[in-house]
Image (cartoon, rainbow, N blue to C red):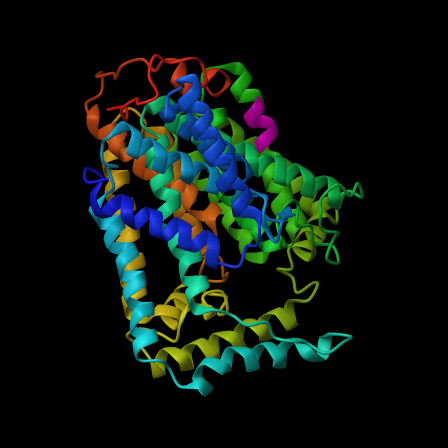
Amino acid sequence: MRKTGPVLVFLMIVSAAGFVLAGVGATPAVGVVLGILAVGAAGLSRVSTDRIVWVTACIFVVTVTWNGIRVGGGAFGNVFLALAVVSLVAHVIMSGKPLALPPWLLIVGLGVLLAQLLSLVFPPNVELTNMSDVQFLTLYTNAMPSPVYLPHRSDVAQLLKFEVSIVLVPVLMLAAGVTRRRCTQLLDLFTISALVNGFVAVADYSGFQIGPTPLSGTRASGLTIHPNYLALTATIAIPLAMLWLARADVRWRLAGMFAVPTLVVSVYASGSRAGAVTAVMAVALTAVALPRLRRSLAVVLPVLGMLGVVVLVFTSTGDHILSQVRISGGGDTAGSDYQRSYVASVAIEQIKARPLQGVGFSVIADAHDIYLELLAAGGAIVLASFFLFCGGLVAATTRGLRGLLRNEVTAAAIAVGLWLVNGILDNQVADKYLYVVPGVLIAMGRVSARAPVEGVTEATPGAVDDVSSALPSEPSARAPVPA
């Protein structure tokens, strides 16, 4: 423990408190038990704990976007996050080496914690904190067939959820993504997760209901809890799926030819206006940014342009598309616009009253604008911490572009940028799946820093980098963290 220092202690406190206090029920407890069993089995069979971390991290990445599947009061992926964290803590202790955590990421976590501590020491006026409850009642009571009862919303619980997302998930990706091949596989697994999500949504929209949530009008949710979650998940995954189109292996290109249209159509099925705009941006930016795809634009664009003219001019497809994504005013756009305007005005009043530390993290998902939400919840302290997080991603991107993962870094940076743009009209800032790609981006920056010059290659990864062969016997359970 002495060698791991405050970093390990901080991670243990965040993970344990987050899983116990964040109100996610029995789900993480199952993961903790499974993690303890996995570490024990690793010790008995002399399997490397590093490989346990790798496998559990991969399973978490695959399931993290499926937050509509609820188990024991929480999202399905929480089981595997808890399992992976237990494995990571055990690996750090058993290997006897400290976990390499970027200092700025620790500062981000401490900044978020500081804002909430200030709110606890100097609590906001009760009327100010009740504004969000009043807005909820104002917006939703008249639409409900029965009385609406407001559940208690804990600032501490929401704080810990946010800390788990913005600190713990990137740390797990850093611990897992220690080679170029591993980083690429993590991005592929996230894309597969989003692709399954999108396929379920398209099937639901087509009349074959297989997802856990039925259509909301004409809007599909896939395996997520809301259509907007489906749209953002697919948007983030589109640049990563387009990486498959740029690979030399024909099998990956065929997979990309299936994945990209499926993800785009799933955004259409979600009926999200912000998702529709950012999905188009995702395709356009990635096609221009990746050299192999950019060279194909001279052939692809004229063909797509002619097809688009025929479809839009001579059929009613254009009107149907605009109506489904509610850009032409279809669906519940008037009510949605009113709600967004109302909750934004409440957030602005809270920010004016407490600009430094905010009113508490119970309002972290209220304003439907992630920047207003951060200011309302934690004031200038939390917004500055979030900008520091974004600055760390920019630095990781800069390092990564000098290395051998340029295409992967480019696609991941586009994905993160689209999330930040989408956040102007959406409330998703504290969800775990949002921080998987940023975490892998940080890992790619670190890996690229070890081989920054073109033509320099790192050691060929062994079986440890292959998910299908990740658990062979090892001579010792005290394997060091890979360099």
Q: Nearer the viewer, residue 374 or 101?
A: 101
Q: Is residue 455 above or below residue 319?
A: above
Relative to residue 300, is residue 270 drawn left or right?
Answer: right
Residue 17 visible within the image: yes
Query: Relative to residue 31, is residue 70 drawn left or right?
Result: right
Residue 295 occupies which quadrant of the picture? Answer: top left
Residue 71 x, y percent position in the rendering:
63, 47
- Evaluate whether residue 276 shows in this view: no
Q: Nearer the viewer, residue 420 or 121?
A: 121
* Residue 422: x %, y % from top left: 47, 55
Q: Position of residue 128 (x, y in %)?
A: 44, 84
Does residue 450 show up magenta in the picture?
Answer: no
The residue located at (47%, 55%) in the rendering is 20
The C terminus sits in image quarter: top left
Q: Closer to the camera, 314 or 2?
A: 2
**Residue drawn at 47 percent across, 79 percent down:** 345
Q: Position of residue 384 (x, y in %)?
A: 27, 62
Considering only vertical position in the picture, is 14 above or below 342? above
In which quadrant of the rendered image does the N terminus lie?
Answer: top left
Q: Main secondary structure of the magenta part?
A: helix
In the picture shown, does residue 180 fall above or below 285?
A: above
The span picked out in magenta is 255-259
Say whether residue 142 is left or right of residue 301: right
Residue 170: quarter of image = top left
Instruction: Give the residue displayed 74% in from the left and 53% down from the top.
Output: 215
Residue extending furthest toward the right: 207
